Structure formats: structure tokens, C-alpha cells
Image (tube, rainbow, N blue to C red):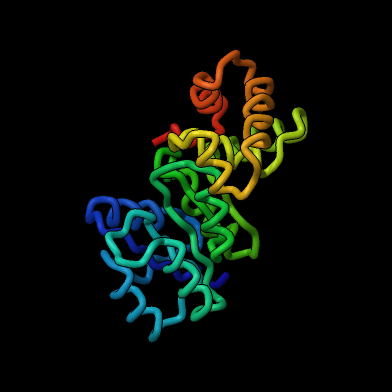
Amino acid sequence: MQSIKTVVVDHHVVSRYGITSLVSNSKDEVHVSAMFADIKSAEQYLSDHSVHVLLIDDQLPQADGIETIIARLREKYIGMSIIVIGNKINSRYIMRLFDHGARGFVYKQDQLEDNLVLAIKTVRNGNVYLSPRVSTLFYNIRQIQQKDDLNGSDFLVLQSIEQGYNPQEIARQLDITTRSVYRIYGRLRHVLNVRTNEQIVDAARKKGLLDELQ
């Protein structure tokens, strides 16, 4: 079986070596070819070497955002799969990463020793991978959508509420009427089983719908 050539990019030296050690010590056919503290150095390596999977921390101190980095790498290295090692859980954020070309997301507070090699093998086989708490988040969202008929606009309003915007500001941002925003407020109160608008965010966090897991 051909070894899965993997590169690690993480600016924290302890984390970088820890991830490399976890992957390298596995009995599976995964080989860490190189590790880097920044994406520029990693790209210089990628231009000269064949790499199957890139593990990249989402808190790199780069001028470009993580989505931009992923999109650029996916365009240049079509045969390489990208797994993001994430420091936060937020459904909209994770979906953006996948929209830009990521194939896996491993939450740092999940058991990395149980998830990293599995994630690498999964994306190498052409599938996507979400570590357990991320999978649970998306499962909860799906269950609520199916049970209570929440849609994408409802979740956008919910996240705007969390960010502190008032109904008029949310209406302008989402290009909908203020009346529609208030209607969504009512639906959110019903779904989350709360009486006031002020209780919406806390209730949503308890259900795992917002990025309370840091």
C-alpha cells in the first residue's frame, strides 16, 4: 500500500510537533513528509514535491484568510486534499471552508489521536471528514431543520443576533424586510422554546447551533 504523504502547517511549534508525532506513530500507512510554521514555506515545498494531504491550522498569522489560502492551494494542487485543524466550531464558518475546497475539519478539542489518521485516510479515499463534535453540530442543525422547518435565512438571522445586530440592521444586511426579521424572531423563540428575544442566543448555544465551543 502506498504511503499517504502528508504535510503539517501550524505556527505553534509544540502543536506542530505534537500533530506530527501523533500521525507518525500510527500503524497506518501515513507519512509526514514535512512540517512548516507558515504557509509560504509550505507552498515552496509543495511546488517541488508530491503531497497527498495537507493538515493546516486555521489560526495561521497570515495576511490572507484561511478560506483564501485553501482556495489558492486547491487551484494549484488539484490532487491534494486539505484538512483544517480548527480552534472553533461554527457551522457557517466550516461550510465556508468546504466551499473553498477543504475536504476535512478536525476540531482541536476532539481526541486528535483518534481522528487525525482517520481523517487523512478518509479524504485520501475521496470522502469528506468531520470530527465527532463537528458531526454532532451538523446533525443537531439538520434535526432542527427537519423537525421545525428552519431554513438558511433563519440561521443567518440567528447568527446576526449573536453578533449583536438589531432587527433593522439585520434586515439591511440580509436584504429582507424588518417584518420578515421579526417573523423569524418568533419562529426562533418557538423552536428554542424561550419566551423572550434575549433568551434566543443562550438557548441556541445550548443546542450547539452557535460557536460556544472554543
Residue lying furthest bottom in this view?
48
Q: Which of the 4 quarters of the picture holds residue 207?
A: top right
Task: Name the image quarter holding residue 20.
Answer: bottom left
**Front-most of residues 184 and 137:** 184
Rendered location of residue 86, percent (x, y): 42, 49
Q: Residue at x 40, y 79 (%)?
A: 46
At horizontal 52% and vertical 78% (from top left) the residue drawn is 75
Instruction: State the residue in front, 30 or 63.
Output: 63
Q: Position of residue 169 (x, y in %)?
A: 50, 41
Q: Front-most of 181 and 214?
A: 181
Q: At x 23% / y 51%, what residue is drawn?
A: 14
Q: Which quadrant of the view contains residue 126?
A: bottom right
Give the mark count: 0
Q: In this view, which residue lies farthest toward the left?
A: 13
> Please, is residue 208 above or below residue 195 in the view?
below
**Image quadrant in which the C terminus is located:** top left
Which quadrant is home to the N terminus? Answer: bottom right
38 relative to 107 in the view: left or right: left
